[in-house]
Amino acid sequence: MPAFIKIDKKEDCYGCRVCEQICPHNCISVSEDAEGFKYPAVDENLCTECGICIKHCPKINNTIFEESQLKEPEVFAAKLKNEQVLLKSSSGGMFSAIAELVIEKGGVVFGCALDKDFIAKHICVENKVDLEGLRGSKYVQSDLNSSYLKARDYLMQGRLVFYTGTPCQISGLKAFLGKDCENLITADLICHGTPSQKLFSKYLDWLQNNLGEQLLTYEFRNKDKMGWGLCYKAATRTKTKYSHGDFDPYYSAFLKAKTYRYTCYSCKYATTVREGDFTLADYWGIELCHSKFYSSKGVSLLLINSLKGQVFFEELKGRIDYIPSKLEYAKMKNGNLEHPAKKPYIRDFIYKELDSMDFDTYLERNLKLDSKFRVGIKLIVPIPIKIALKKLLYKIKEGK
C-alpha cells in the first residue's frame, strides 16, 4: 500500500486540498474531473512517501479536539440587530456578527466569495466593507486554493482568525494545522452538499443568454422581493430577475440533492457532533417552536460547540437578539444535522451529458422542473396561513 494519497473512489475525497497544501515536497496537485470536481494526484517521481498527506487527511482521520468540545451543542435562535446588514444576509446575520467583532479586534476573516467571473473561492478580508462578498449562501463548492496556508501564517503572527466553511472544509483546516489554536475561531455550516463549479458556470452562461446581457451580479439568497427564503437575484445593467429556487433548474436540482459531489452522500459531518466552534444555518421551522421570534427578515440557527465558542458568544450578545432553543427543534427542518443527503438515482447520470449537448437540451433531459402550478400554489399562500398550517401538521404528526 503506497504511503501517499491515492483516490480510488470518488467517495473517498472531500476536495479540501489539505494534502496539496501540507505536502513538504510540492508533489501533489489538484485537477478537475469530467464533472468539474477537484481531486488530488501525486507525482510519484517527486514523492518520498513520507505519509504526511495521509496523516493529515480529514477523510481518514478524526479532527475534533475533544478536550475543548462540549458534550452537546448549546442551541440558540438569533438575529442581528443591525437591520441593514441583516437584510443582506441569507438568514439572521450571525456570520456578520462574528466577523465584524473579529475585525474590530484586529483579526482576519476567511470565507467564500464569488469573484468577477462567478467562481466560488475562499478569500481573506481585513475590513468590514469587504465582508459583503462573504455574506450570503453559495450553493457550489468553493475553491480553497491556499487559504489554509494563509490562515496558518496569520495564526503564527498572533492575529485572530475567523474561518468559515462547510464542515469538511473546517475539518480540513484543523487537519492541516494538526492542533487547536487559541486565536482561531471556526464556524461550519449545516451543509446539504455541493454541486461543481463547472455546472454552475454553464448554468450562469445559460442564464446570461436568456437575459440577453452580461450578468453583473448573482445572489443565491435575496430578501428584496420575498423576504427570508429561497429567492435568487440575477442582474445585468438594465434587467433584474428574481425567482424562487423551485422555478430554477440549477437551484431546484440543488434542493433535491441531484448534483452534489459524491462524498456528500456519505458525509461523516452530517451529525450534531460538529467541527466548528460555531455552527451557522437558517432556523427553518422556527415558526413551529418559537413563533414569536419568527421574522420575515431572517433568523439564524446558532449552535455553540466548544468552550471557545461559549467565551466568544458572550462578546456577541450586545449585537444580536437571541433566545435559547433545543437541539430537537433545530433538527426538525435541518435534516443534515442527523444524516447526509440521500443520493437520488439520477445522480449517477446527471453530469454525463454536460459537455455533449447544448445547455437547453441538457436541462430538459436532466434538470427538468416540477410543475410550476404545484410550486406556485406553495408560494402564493400568505405567510400567516403557512405558519398556521405548519403548526397544525406538526401537532398532528406529534399526536398532540
Image: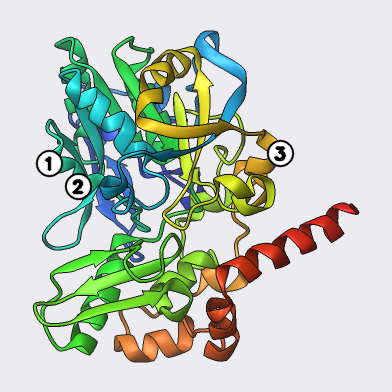
Q: Which mark is residue 328?
A: 3
Work out how far the residue at label 2 is from the one at label 3, CA to CA, in angstroms: 32 Å
Q: Nearer the viewer, residue 13 or 197?
A: 197
Q: Residue at x 37, y 15 (%)?
A: 178
Instruction: State whether residue 314 is above or below residue 41.
Output: above
Marks 2 and 3 in Cβ contact (< 8 Å): no
Q: Which mark is residue 129?
A: 1
Q: Residue at x 37, y 77 (%)?
A: 243
Q: Nearer the viewer, residue 169 or 322?
A: 322
Work out how far the residue at label 1 is from the one at label 2, CA to CA, in angstroms: 6 Å
Q: Nearer the viewer, residue 3 or 263?
A: 263
| Residue 389 left/right relative to 126 | right
Q: Which residue is mark 2?
A: 132
Q: Position of residue 56 (x, y in %)?
A: 39, 23
Q: Report how many numbered discs are placed on residues in the image.
A: 3
Q: Position of residue 1 (x, y in %)?
A: 47, 30
Mark 3 or mark 1, which is nearer the start of the sequence?
1
Q: Residue at x 36, y 25 (%)?
A: 318
Instruction: State whether residue 55 is above or below residue 118.
Output: above
| Residue 143 left/right relative to 266 | left
Marks 1 and 2 in Cβ contact (< 8 Å): yes
